[in-house]
Image: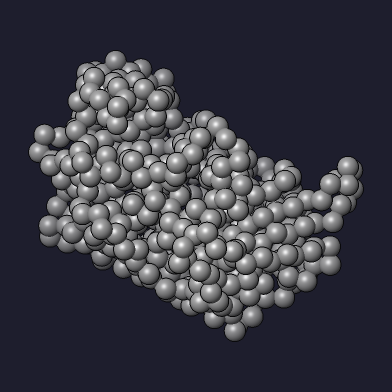
C-alpha cells in the first residue's frame, strides 16, 4: 500500500508510456496514483476469452508433446504425473471416461512470453512477496493470526507514522508474510464497500518481480487492467544503509479475477523487521506475555493460494494467467473424476517459470441435489475470490499439534479414513515415515503416489462468513495438491456445511 505523509520518503509516480504497444493507452479511467487510494476501481469485470471448454491432455507413457519427450508414471491413487524432458511437471487425473482435447491444451501451454528464463533483464514473476487482507479491524485481525498461527509482528503503518487514512499491520512467520489493512475514516468508500461485499478477505497477492518496467509493458500489452500505475519510492539513507545507497521500491498493481489484484514489487534491498515497504516502521503490536510460552508453529512459507469462481469462469481465468503473467498449467482435475452428490471440483493449477508461485484456480460445479462448499463460498463471498492459503511446514505433526494448543479448529476426518488408508498403502511402495495413529489423532490427511507423499489438513473457516480457510501442508517428494483426499475432504466439508444449514 502507498505511504502517506512520511518525511523520509520521496515518491515519484510515473505514468507508463506504451507508445510501442498499440492501442493499450492508459487513462485516468484505468489507472490511479498510489496516493489516491479512494478511487481504486472495484468491479466484477470478467475477462473475455475465445477459448472453448478445456479438458485434459492424454498422458501417454513415452509420448511426445511440443517436441519434447514425456515420461509418465501411474500413481497409487489413480492419477498420472508427466515428467517433461525440460524438467517441468504436469499432473492430471487418469480417467478413460474424460474427453480430453490435446489441441486446446497444447494451445494453452504454448501461450507464453517468449524469453530466455536465464536472462535477468526479462521482466518476470519470481515469488510470492506477501498477501494483503482488507478487514474491519486490522489490529484485531493481526492479533488473531499471531495467537492462532504463531505469526509475529513485522511492520506497521498508520496514524502514528503519518498515514492519515489507513492502519496497516504486517505479521510474518519465516517467509510467510500477511498484511492487514483497515480504514480509519468512515468515508473510505473503496475499502468499506469491499468489506461489505466480501467480508474480511484477501484483496491483493503481491509478487516479487524482476525488471518491473519490462514486465508491466508485457502484461498491459496482453490486456491486463492497471489499477495502480508504476511508482518508484525512495527511502533516504539511514544507519541501516552504511554505504549510503538509497533503498528503492518499484511497484504497480493490476486487476485479476473478482476484486482481487496483483501487485508487482521490485526492491533493491532485503526487508527486515520494520522495513517491509517504505513508510512502514517497527510494529506497534506486541504478543501478550501469556502467549510467550506457547509452542512455536514451524510454518515455512506460503505453498499455494487458491482462487474460487462461479461456474464457467475457470477456462477464461486460466487463459488470462497464461497470456498475461506467462504462467503455465501445472496440474488439473475436474468434477467428472472426483465428486459426491453434493460436491465436485474443476481446477487448473497455474505456476510461474520457476514454480515458486502456484495458484490453483477452481470453479463451482453444479451439484446433483444441493449446494456444495464451492457454491457456499461464492454465495457468502459474493462472487470470485481467494478461498484458501496453503502454508508449508517441515513438520506438520508439530505444526498442527501446536496450532491446536493455540485454539485453532480443523476439519474432522472420520477414523474409517485411516483404516482405509492403511489398506491403500499396502498396494503402494511409498513409505510413510509418520505414525499413522498419530496422524489419525490429529486428523491429518495423506495423499501419495509411487514417488512420494504429502500430508495436509484444513482449518474450519477462520471468520464468521464461511469463506476463507487455511491449509497446512508438508511435502515428501510429492508436488500434487491432495486429489486423493478430495472425496474424504468433500464429506468433511459437507458435514460442516450442513451444520450451517447450507447443504
The image shows residue 81, relative to residue 50, as above or below, that is above
Residue that appears at 67% across and 42% down: 293
Q: Quadrant of the N terminus?
A: bottom right
x then y, percent, for residue 406: 55, 47
Residue closest to the far top: 429
The image shows residue 118, relative to residue 462, as above or below, that is above
x then y, percent, for residue 397: 47, 32
From the viewer's side, name the closer residue of 429 and 52.
52
Residue that appears at 25% across and 25% down: 64
Report the number of numbered marks: 0
The image shows residue 237, relative to residue 112, as above or below, that is below
Q: Looking at the image, can residue 144 be seen? A: no
Q: Looking at the image, can residue 103 be seen? A: yes
Residue closest to the far bottom: 187
Residue 483: image quadrant is top left
Residue 49: image quadrant is bottom left
x then y, percent, for residue 190: 53, 76
Give the color scheme: rainbow, by chain, secondary structure or one colour: one colour
x then y, percent, for residue 499: 28, 60
Residue 487 relative to residue 195: left or right:
left
Q: Quadrant of the C terminus?
A: bottom left
Residue 306 relative to residue 186: left or right:
left
Residue 32 relative to residue 387: left or right:
right
Residue closest to the far left: 97
Residue that appears at 42% across and 61% down: 223
Residue that appears at 39% across and 29% down: 88
Amino acid at each position: 500500500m502507498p505511504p502517506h505523509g512520511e518525511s523520509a520518503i520521496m515518491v515519484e509516480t510515473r505514468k507508463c508510456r506504451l507508445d510501442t504497444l498499440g492501442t493499450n493507452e492508459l487513462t485516468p479511467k484505468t489507472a490511479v496514483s498510489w496516493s489516491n487510494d479512494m478511487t481504486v476501481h472495484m468491479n466484477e469485470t470478467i475477462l473475455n476469452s475465445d477459448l472453448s471448454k478445456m479438458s485434459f491432455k492424454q498422458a501417454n507413457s513415452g509420448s511426445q508433446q511440443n517436441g519434447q519427450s514425456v515420461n509418465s508414471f501411474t500413481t497409487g491413487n489413480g492419477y498420472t504425473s508427466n515428467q517433461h524432458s525440460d524438467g517441468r511437471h504436469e499432473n492430471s487425473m487418469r480417467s478413460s471416461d474424460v474427453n480430453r482435447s490435446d489441441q486446446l491444451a497444447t494451445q494453452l501451454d504454448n501461450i507464453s512470453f517468449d524469453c530466455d528464463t536465464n536472462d535477468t533483464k526479462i521482466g518476470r514473476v519470481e515469488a510470492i512477496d506477501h498477501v494483503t487482507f482488507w478487514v474491519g479491524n486490522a489490529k484485531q485481525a493481526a492479533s488473531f493470526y499471531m495467537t492462532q498461527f504463531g505469526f509475529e509482528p513485522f511492520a506497521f503503518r498508520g496514524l502514528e507514522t503519518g498515514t492519515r487514512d489507513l492502519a496497516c499491520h504486517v505479521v510474518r512467520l519465516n517467509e510467510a508474510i500477511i498484511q492487514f489493512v483497515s480504514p480509519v475514516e468512515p468515508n473510505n468508500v473503496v475499502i468499506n464497500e469491499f468489506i461489505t461485499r466480501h467480508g474480511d478477505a484477501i484483496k491483493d497477492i503481491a509478487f516479487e518481480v524482476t525488471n518491473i518496467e519490462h514486465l508491466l509493458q508485457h502484461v498491459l500489452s496482453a490486456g491486463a487492467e492497471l489499477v495502480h500505475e508504476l511508482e518508484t519510492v525512495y527511502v533516504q539513507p539511514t544507519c541501516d544503509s552504511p554505504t549510503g545507497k538509497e533503498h528503492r521500491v518499484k511497484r504497480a498493481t493490476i486487476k485479476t479475477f473478482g476484486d482481487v489484484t496483483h501487485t508487482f514489487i521490485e526492491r533493491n534491498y532485503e526487508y527486515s523487521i520494520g522495513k517491509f515497504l517504505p513508510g512502514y516502521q517497527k510494529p506497534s503490536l506486541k504478543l501478550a506475555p501469556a502467549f510467550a510460552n506457547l509452542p512455536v508453529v514451524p510454518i515455512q512459507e506460503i505453498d499455494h493460494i487458491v482462487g474460487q469462481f462461479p461456474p464457467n469462469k475457470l477456462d477464461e481465468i486460466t487463459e488470462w494467467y497464461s497470456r498475461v503473467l506467462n504462467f503455465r498449467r501445472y496440474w488439473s482435475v475436474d468434477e467428472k473424476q472426483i465428486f459426491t452428490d453434493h460436491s465436485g471440483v474443476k481446477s487448473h493449477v497455474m505456476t510461474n517459470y520457476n514454480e515458486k508461485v502456484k495458484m490453483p484456480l477452481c470453479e463451482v460445479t453444479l451439484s446433483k441435489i444441493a449446494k456444495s462448499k464451492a457454491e457456499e463460498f461464492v454465495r457468502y463471498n459474493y462472487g470470485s475470490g481467494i478461498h484458501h492459503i496453503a502454508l508449508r511446514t517441515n513438520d506438520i505433526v508439530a505444526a498442527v499439534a501446536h496450532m491446536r494448543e493455540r485454539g485453532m479448529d480443523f476439519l474432522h476426518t472420520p477414523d474409517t479414513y485411516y483404516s482405509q488408508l492403511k489398506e491403500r498403502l499396502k498396494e503402494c511402495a511409498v513409505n510413510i515415515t509418520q505414525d499413522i495413529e498419530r496422524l489419525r489423532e490429529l486428523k491429518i490427511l495423506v495423499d501419495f503416489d509411487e514417488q512420494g507423499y504429502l500430508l495436509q489438513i484444513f482449518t474450519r473457516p477462520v471468520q464468521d462468513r464461511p469463506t476463507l480457510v487455511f491449509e497446512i501442508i508438508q511435502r515428501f517428494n510429492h508436488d500434487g495438491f491432495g486429489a486423493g483426499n478430495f472425496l474424504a475432504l468433500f464429506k468433511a466439508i459437507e458435514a460442516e456445511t450442513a451444520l450451517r444449514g447450507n447443504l
